[in-house]
Amino acid sequence: MAVLDILTYPDERLKQTSLAVDVFDPELANLVADLEETMDVGPGSVGIAAPQVNIFKRIAIVDVTPMVERARAKKRRFRSSHNGRMVLINPELLEQDSEATGREGCLSVPDYTGNVIRAKRIVLQVKDIKGDVKTYHCEGFESCAVQHELDHLDGLLFLDRLVSARELFRRKAHLQG
Amino acid sequence: MIEPGGQQNWYMLTVVGQDRPGIVAALTQALYEGGCHLGEASMMRLGENFTVMMMVTGATENTLKELTAPVAERMQLRIHIDPIRARLHHHREPDVQINVYGADRTGIVAEVTGALAEAGMNIVDLNSDVAGTEEKPVYIMLIDGYASQGIAALERALASLKDKGVDVRLTPVETLVG
């Protein structure tokens, strides 16, 4: 187990497309364990993707548990599904619908957060570390977190999807009008 | 690039003028040619005017005036320059968003922001607009802020505004870091 170094933008490597995993061996399990450890030391991080640690394979982890627990401690409603720790290998979006706006930041983009619009609900098919197929239904915050990580696998950052305060403003006003 | 760890003298450049194409391009080109660096900025069209608030460093106040004066002249802009105490890379992230809307009348902003300020709210970003028609104007405001005394304090403050004819909704901002 090891905490891996995080690539930070403007490192061009973050912009490359990662390749599918085709061997499900102990080495893969080790890599997933390292990713988990790296994610867990990140401040308030709910996900990580392999390309963020300079490994260009289609692997990501999402776990919104810290946010769920924080909301529970503060007795706040948290608009999110909660699938626990999801290991997403070769993930495919099967369905997506509706829109959710949220504020995002990224381990690879220090000192910046911005508003992003993503699909509110997604259905996702992935492989786990043994290569078995799994399906996840995600909603709200967790759905956004998964899409954030999937973007990394295609060389996209949340910076590619920023919406201006004005645009957000128009959408909110429209929703209420 | 601005040298890491270096001490910069920052200025806030404030620009207002009738909106027309090319204001940002002309202004930033003049500053670039004069060797200036830009920091954080907010630029927006407000009521047919174009407005700029922009952090600038890399020149003295007088040089900034000289660099921007021809642009101001050509594009009919009013430009104001203030020395400021400022640093980059110290964003304060909002932890709460507040939407306000209602039939437009005087005092909405003062009432809402007054109640929020008393309850410990620091505004990070505020956008407001008047929508609807001339006969029935609607005021809309979206505030991102930081609740220095916690969100519950803001909720209590906003509850006191319920009977004043404005709809106010508070949403905690849960920033996703991935």
Image: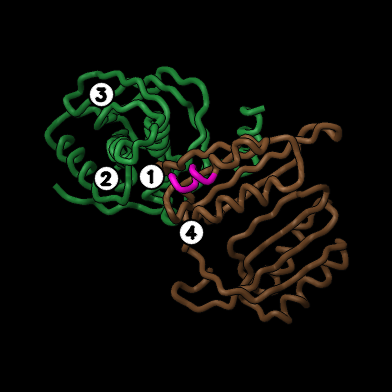
Which residue appears at 63% of the width and 39% of the height? B100
Q: What is the three-letter code of the residue carrying label 2?
A: Met
Residue on which disc 3 sits: A127
Which residue appears at 48% of the width and 26% of the height? A119
- In what element is the residue under mark 2? helix
Viewer-nearest of discs 4 and 2 = 4
Chief secondary structure of the magenta portion: helix
Compare marks 1 and 4 and give the one earlier in the sequence: 4
Per the rendered image, the range of residues in magenta is: B152-157
Labels 1 and 4 within one chain: yes
Q: CA distance from mark 1 to mark 4?
A: 15 Å
Residue on which disc 2 sits: A39
Compare marks 3 and 2 and give the one earlier in the sequence: 2
Task: Residue B154: say if magenta.
Answer: yes
- Where residue B91 sits in the image (x, y, percent)? 48, 59
Residue on which disc 1 sits: B177
Labels 3 and 1 within one chain: no
Q: Are marks 3 and 1 in contact (CB under 8 Å)?
A: no
- Where residue B59 sits in the image (x, y, percent)? 65, 78
Q: Quadrant of residue A149?
A: top left
Viewer-nearest of discs 3 and 1 = 1
Q: Are marks 4 and 2 in contact (CB under 8 Å)?
A: no
- Where residue A148 sits in the image (x, y, percent)? 41, 37
Left or right of B176? Residue A26 is left
Q: What tint does the image give chain B?
A: brown
Q: What is the three-letter code of the residue carrying label 4?
A: His
Which residue appears at 27% of the width and 45% of the height? A39
- In what element is the residue under mark 3? strand
